[in-house]
Image: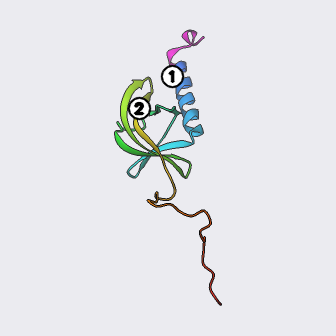
Amino acid sequence: MSEYLPKELRDQLAAAHRKTKRKRATRSVHIGDEAFAILEMSDNGFAVATDEAPRLRGLVDIYEGPRHLYQALIVASAEAGDLMRYDFKRNTAAVPNPPVDFEQAANRPVGLLSKA
């Protein structure tokens, strides 16, 4: 069907499709103080808009809204149309607390009460 449409109209439809994808994107990749919407994500990597993000490389943080999901080491994989794909070299789930190097008792006190 798209081969029957004029090129200008196809370009406008593609631009509208990209805009809709960006609005629906809930995940974002953060590198330093910059953040870019993730348009596609899989177990092996993710894709961002080529015109929006510079060539990313190295250690990045991935968020879903305000929640920190992963810290990942990435490398640029391929440019596919208007998407730049990145592969994970390492993808580690983010944890809210640092790991402890000792066993914690299951019945340990969670707080202290004062004698007041």
Of helix, strand and loop, which mostly describes the magenta segment?
helix
Q: Which residue is mark 1?
A: 11
Residue 25 lies in the magenta stretch: no
Magenta part of the chain: 1-8
In the displayed image of the protein, which residue is found farthest to the bottom?
Answer: 116
Q: Is residue 99 left or right of residue 112?
A: left
Residue 4 lies in the magenta stretch: yes
Q: Residue, x 50% and y 43% (percent of image)?
A: 28
Residue 112 is tagged as none
Q: Which residue is mark 2?
A: 87
Q: Which structural element holds mark 2?
A: strand
Task: Where is residue 111? Give x, y as percent.
Answer: 60, 74
Q: Amino acid at mark 2?
A: Asp
Q: CA distance from mark 2 to mark 1?
A: 28 Å
Q: Amino acid at mark 1?
A: Asp
Task: Where is residue 97? Give x, y as percent.
Answer: 50, 59
Q: Quarter of the image for the C terminus: give it.
A: bottom right
